[in-house]
Image (tube, rainbow, N blue to C red):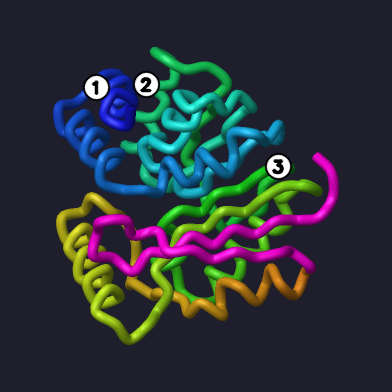
């Protein structure tokens, strides 16, 4: 099932590199299936902050998530790639280049997947405040992040991210992995419920999924 889904998404990308990347990413990373499991029953729209080339949006469409999805990212080349695929194969998706630190007029669910550690602490706080402001009653914020910890998985993640930045696949500043407490505190202070679960699958990385739910009805 996962392999067929990856092939369906990958075939729409314009370059051989992106086709291969998508097939590998979907097969190796448990993130997409986990997020789909959390969102497919929701009727709220989704804001995907740091959408990259749109893989999460396309995975969700293939998994039966029908509400509108808006993806933003600062990397124009990836945004253009996502736009090309969406125009060719999927409906109800919008991708645009935008500054994630600017508050957006949005209300629904929010995802920030592997985003926070590219920003300094003050900017991370702003990103989390923006996510909170954009979450509708009954909505969810889903964050995948590598919390700063003293273990081999953390240092493996740090090395991999540094390499990706060196080859310019990931465009960001200095790596700044937040602590678990820095991620949790803004949501707990505002009455969200929180769930934290390992999200590294068969990879050597220190990834966790942070799921924050706002009380209320969609």
| Residue 200 in view (yes/no) | yes
Q: Observer-nearest residue: 23 or 169?
A: 23
Residue designated by label 3: 108
**Which image quarter holds the N terminus?**
top left
Q: Number of numbered discs present?
A: 3
**Residue 154 colored magenta?**
no
Q: Secondary structure at mark 3?
A: loop
Q: Is residue 156 left or right of residue 149?
A: left
Q: Quadrant of the C terminus?
A: top right
Q: Is residue 38 above or below residue 170?
A: above
Circle 2 crowding by C-alpha within 10 Å: few under 14, some 14–19, many from 20: some
- Mark 1 or 3: in front is 3
Residue lying at 74% horizontally and 43% vertically, measured from the top left: 107
**Residue 38 quadrant:** top right
- Numbered disc in front, either 2 or 3: 3
Question: Which of the 4 image quarters holds residue 191?
Answer: bottom right
Question: In this orientation, does residue 13 appear?
Answer: no
Q: Which residues are magenta?
A: 191-218
Q: Mark 1 and mark 3 in contact? Answer it, CB < 8 Å.
A: no
Q: How many angstroms separate mark 1 from mark 2 (CA)?
A: 8 Å
Compare marks 1 and 3 and give the one earlier in the sequence.
1
Q: Where is residue 166? Give x, y as percent.
A: 17, 61
- Name, please, the residue furthest toward the front: 1
In this figure, which residue is indicated by the disc labeled 1? 14
Q: Are marks 1 and 2 in contact (CB under 8 Å)?
A: yes
């Amino acid at each position: 099932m996962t392999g067929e889904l990856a092939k369906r998404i990958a075939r729409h990308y314009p370059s051989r590199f992106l086709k291969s990347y998508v097939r590998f990413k979907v097969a190796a990373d448990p993130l997409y299936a986990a997020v789909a499991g959390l969102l497919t029953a929701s009727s709220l729209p989704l804001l995907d902050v740091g959408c990259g080339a749109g893989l999460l949006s396309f995975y969700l469409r293939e998994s039966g998530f029908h509400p509108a999805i808006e993806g933003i990212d600062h990397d124009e080349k990836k945004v253009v790639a996502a736009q090309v695929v969406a125009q060719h194969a999927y409906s109800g998706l919008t991708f645009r280049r935008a500054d994630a630190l600017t508050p957006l007029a949005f209300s629904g669910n929010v995802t920030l997947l592997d985003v926070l550690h590219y920003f300094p602490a003050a900017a991370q706080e702003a990103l989390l405040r923006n996510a909170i402001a954009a979450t509708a009653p009954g909505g969810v914020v889903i964050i995948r992040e590598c919390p700063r910890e003293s273990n081999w998985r953390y240092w493996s993640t740090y090395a991999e991210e540094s390499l990706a930045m060196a080859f310019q696949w990931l465009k960001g500043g200095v790596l700044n992995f937040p602590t678990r407490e820095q991620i949790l505190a803004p949501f707990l202070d505002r009455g969200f419920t929180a769930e934290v679960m390992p999200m590294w699958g068969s990879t050597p990385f220190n990834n966790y999924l942070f799921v924050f739910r706002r009380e209320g009805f969609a």
